[in-house]
Image: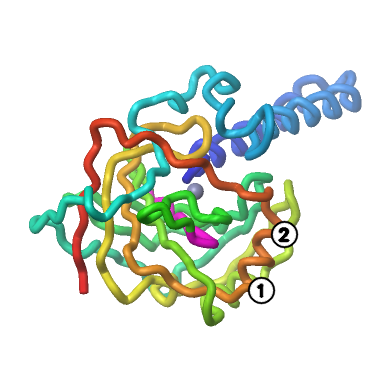
Amino acid sequence: MKRELTIIVFIAFSVFYCKNKSENKSIEPTINIEKQEKINHNEHEHWTYDGETGPKHWAEIEKQSDCNGKRQSPINIIDKDVIVDDSLKPLDIHYSTDVKIHGITNNGHSIQYDFEKGDFIVLNDNKYELKQIHFHEASEHTINGIRYPLEIHLVHINKDKIVVLAILAKEGESSEPFTFLEKYLPIYSGETKLLDAEFDLNLKLPTDKGYYTYNGSLTTPPCTQNVTWFVCKAPITVSVSQVKQLQELMPLNNYRDEQPINERVVKQYVGH
Ligand SMILES: [Zn+2]
């Protein structure tokens, strides 16, 4: 989840910084630009999903992060421990049929589709705009210990909070929305494509409105703990080839392992 906002801000800052740097130091542009790009590249690569820069080391690599916090994500959701909360309602989702995807990026950690303003959800009278969706293969959240082949994160933000809707996918029939998203693949690490494509996100949502909800974090550094999670109970289906396509373009196993639940409770809206 992730990386999400911070990564966008980081990339924006990097581009801005790099641009200013090259403008301000025009006397020795070649060396500086090359050096800066190398630094940016290295900074971008500081954490990974594997080995000495993998998830177990994120807290030590990212000193300012919350990766060692007590309310981290993802978690293993165990049905018998989940509380049915009758006050919960179906998610108040306002996804329009014609909101545009304006870009697709392979940031080296995941493949991300960025959305223009217009899709949002309302939670406790607050509006959270959909910023981007991205993928984890295999899933980050597990249900009763079961890990799904794919998890899609729909990242919504307002000025001080993040709401992520997580959709689990199992292998089955190919999914129409996925076929649409796949039209723009492959996209390789570090690459961005600008698009101007309308996309109806409603097609992708499970028809069963049941969900689990809990308070957690981004699942990538800086692992910020201001995220309300909604994990759809019903998985969607994607074809084996659709999973494989994403798998080939993303780091192998780009998921973070289960984090301790500590004092938290997971609630559920049962749906139907
Ligand atoms: Zn994510």
Quick check: is the Cβ at mark 1 less than 8 Å away from ligand 1?
Answer: no
Residue drawn at (53%, 17%) of the image: 63
**Residue linked to disc 1:** 241
Q: Which residue does the image show at 72% across and 30% down from the upper left?
A: 40
Of the pair 43 and 237, the residue shown nearer to us: 237
* Residue 153 among magenta residues: yes
Give the magenta-colored segment's residue range.
148-156
Image quadrant for the C terminus?
A: bottom left
Say if 23 sits above or below 250 in the image.
above
* Amino acid at pointer 2: Glu
19 or 261, which lies in front?
261
Query: Is residue 44 left or right of 154 when viewed as pictured?
Result: right
Q: Assess whether residue 117 is covered by the magenta stretch.
A: no
Give neighbour class at mark 2: few <14, some 14-19, many 20+ (Cα, 10 Å).
Answer: few
Return the residue found at the far left.
Answer: 86
Left or right: 271, with 196 as reference point: left
Q: Position of residue 102 (x, y in %)?
A: 57, 60
Q: Position of residue 136 (x, y in %)?
A: 55, 53
Rendered residue at 88%/19% (across/down) = 27
Taking the spot 44% from the left edge, 41% from the top edge, the residue there is 258
Give percent across and percent down for residue 142: 42, 53
Instruction: Name the element at disc 2.
Output: helix
- Residue under pointer 2: 248
Q: Amino acid at mark 1?
A: Ser
Q: Is mark 2 within 8 Å of ligand 1?
A: no
Q: Quadrant of the rendered structure where residue 193 is? A: bottom right
